[in-house]
Amino acid sequence: MKAFATLLDRLVLTPSRNGKLKLLADYFRTVPDPDRGYGLAAIAGTLDLKSVKPAMLRELVMERMDEVLFRYSYDYVGDLAETIALVWDGGARERVDDAKQPRLGDVVTRMNALGRTEVRSAVRDLLDHLDPSARFAFLKLATGGLRIGVSARLAKQALADMSGKDVTEIETLWHGLEPPYEPLFAWLEGGAEKPVLATPAIFHSVMLANPVEDGDLAKLDPADYAAEWKWDGIRVQMSSYGGTKKLYSRSGDDISGAFPDIVDAINFDGVIDGELLVGGTARSNNPTRTFSDLQQRLNRKTVTAKMLEEYPAFVRAYDLLFQSDDDIRAQTFLERRERLSDILTRAPHDRFDLSDLVSFKTWDELEALRRDPPDPVIEGVMIKKKDSVYQAGRLKGPWFKWKRDPFNIDAVMLYAQRGHGKRSSYYSDFTFGVWADGPDGEQLVPVGKAYFGFTDAELEVLDKFVRDNTVDRYGPVRAVKAKPDFGFVLEVAFEGINRSSRHKSGVAMRFPRIARLRQDKLPRDADRLSTLTAMIDAREGGEG
Amino acid sequence: MKPEALLHPTPAGLFCPAGGFHIDPVRPVERALITHGHSDHARAGHRHVLATRQTLDIMRIRYGEDFCESEQGAEFGEVLDVGGVTVSFFPAGHVLGSAQIAVEKDGLRIVASGDYKRGVDATCAPFEPVKCDVFITEATFGLPVFHHPEPRGEIAKLLRSIEQFPDRTHLVGAYSLGKAQRVIRLIRDCGWDKPIYIHGALAKLCDYYAGQGIELGDLRPATIDKSTPDLFKGAIVVGPPSAFQDRWARRFNEPLISFASGWMMVRQRAKQGGVELPLVISDHCDWPELLETIKEIAPSEVWVTHGREEALVRWCELQGLPAKPLHLVGYEDEGD
């Protein structure tokens, strides 16, 4: 438990991706089986550990501590698991011997073997034998509240780093393996053959596309690529074999329970990749409905008959990974699509359809189509290399997504805050505003916050401006000079915009970032709030 | 005599009317007795100052020759008379020169312990328990959550991180009096014999410690030389934490921010401060040490000053020991 706790303590405070990878890879390299496998599971979210209720933990700590002293402590720390981890020894001085602390594997095995009545005393005993940092890790695992800022994907990348294997190979195997992943580590360390999957009816990591960036397409021959519309739904995977039928989200969560309409309609064996949407399939002649309609069906464990009727779901399929139990991911995109099309002709027409190919000869022609799509629920185009094999992960080259252009506005820097880690000596988080009518005439109102999009050289410029033009300080935040004739104009790009009652300005941007520094402009030239509200109106009009 | 008549809080600090002196006053006074050199306890501008020789030296380094009109050095254990009140200084184990001050009149003895700790520290004399009627204790870490680990284990984390990230400059934040020298000394005791680079703000005090026989090894100024940009790769740089948020920190290669402080025990404190590698090293007592000290001294009354007074007062009440908070203002835990 000690090694895992130390890893967590460092990961939580390490901001850089490379730093996290290094810490993870060192952990996997130095910690023995099965502990490292359970550590991996805890980070990747696949660990199954008997859960402990916070109320029971409170009772346990009250057995040995004054309630008032506990309250003072909890008020100060603010997190129950951390408070208990720290106060458990009370006034005692004894320190737990590192070598005698239970190992992570022992803790998992022991907890999972407990009967209902044995949990209380086992947890008490474990807390007595762990040091404060290990107690914290254990309590977070047992209460299900572990937040460390590391994705499963990053953990797999660390496995790739430690072994020199390709991360896509690890992705391909991942969902067929279970904690503590001993065959996986044996293979990674070169001591065993690659593990073989028992059944295809599991989630298989999906292949992801890269956004098209400036100059990407100029280097590519349009004849090598196929295009499809990018529908505004959610990515799903249908997995069916030997009577087991599952619907997974793109991250591998099982969402079958919320979509009986789809799962019941599956009449094929295999693994299909597609877009989950609400409305009618192309074959039913009913329109595809918007993302906000789809949201009515998301994040639910079960679904009512009324919901099923009002918001019927379907899958617009675009790829086939397995045909029956035959893994065809190594075939080309067009070959796989051919087989997919064949399966879909025999599948229920109201629940499944095939994502259309968009024909084009030149990138300019595709650009024109992308700008003016035939359906409001289309948010861009997907570009796929005709001979691309299906590889999990986000490889640059075979697949691209080309979304509608992001929104752009000119805004004025209002506040700045220091960044973290590498950026802790820089003012790198900026709150920006636009002009609006106020009680005293035109005034700048904050509309968002952005902390990336600029280069290191641009950051120097921004930071210098903040330091030279501070007019006020509120703790870590500095207010900067922003007058019609003096200030810093930022071109801000963002993916979307919505009305928001939580923000004073009444608008909330999605994913704002600083696109360009506009030192050529004065704050008086910046945009007005009405420009932003017009963007919302235009969007709502377009979808209605 | 009631203890409150011998020593009681005033806006200027703890005052002894019989002897006409204040202990660690926060405003300029006629006669000041100073426990240790941290700036919230030792201020410039008093007329007469009585303190240990080392505390006087430190005040001179920090405030200049004219930090007071007249000074008097106190030896540990020496019995002094200040205006008819008996005063003695005893080691507090907090920083170099730090002392507890025992004040005695008509058979009543009060010990003002200033800031103190019980953990091992190679840079100052260890705390000495002194029997007394009233014990005045600090409560900087006066909550059951605070358990300071073995300092060498914390330094081991730092050295391990340098092995893992050999290209990154490890910036260790440590307050300039006491903590910085202790951290440097601990790093040496853990076997690091390469040069340690220090921020300019630490130079004079490190020199003073070395002059007092506390071996700190090869210390060099953390100034960059354009011809040797690789100098700070994998190096340890010690400086005051405030400097790390300044432009000063930019000269280093991918700096990894570390901070040696008792506050680092709580994760959120580390996270809010942008600290990547917290080192829980404190010059104050943790909770068990506070309780242990009170039990060992066994006073008939406890007064609690700066810090989390309410928890320690509560604990004393649970033990049936009379206790009260003093509500002194102006002490800001500079030393941790």
Image (cartoon, rainbow, N blue to C red):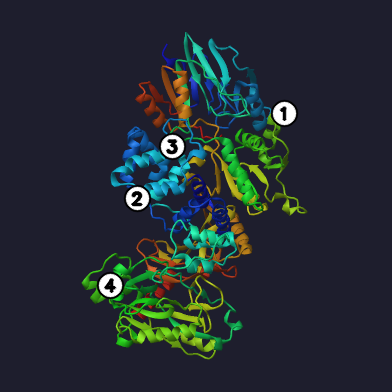
Q: Nearer the viewer, mark 2 or mark 1?
A: 2
- Do residues under tags 1 and 4 come within 8 Å of each other at their CB atoms? no
Give the number of the mark in front: 3 or 2. Answer: 2
As helix, strand or loop, the secondary structure at mark 3 comes to loop
Tag of residue A51: 2
Rendered residue at 64%/42% (across/down)? B238
As measured in the structure, the alpha-carbon distance from the residue carrying label 1 to the one carrying label 4 is: 80 Å
Three-letter residue code for mark 2: Ser
- Disc on res. A260: 4
Q: Tell me the element at label 1.
A: helix
The chain carrying label 4 is A
Where residue A184 sits: x, y (%)? 50, 61
Kind of residue at badge 3? Val
Confirm or deny contact between disc 1 and disc 3 (CB under 8 A). no
Real-space Cα separation, disc 3 to disc 2, in angstroms: 24 Å
Place residue A375 in its image quadrant: bottom left
- State the separation of the CA atoms marked 4 and 2: 29 Å
**Residue A208 location (% of width, % of height):** 49, 73
Real-space Cα distance between discs 2 and 1? 58 Å
Q: Which mark is residue B145?
A: 3
Give the Cα separation between the discs numbered 3 and 4.
50 Å
Q: Is the residue A233 above or below the residue B197 in the image?
A: below
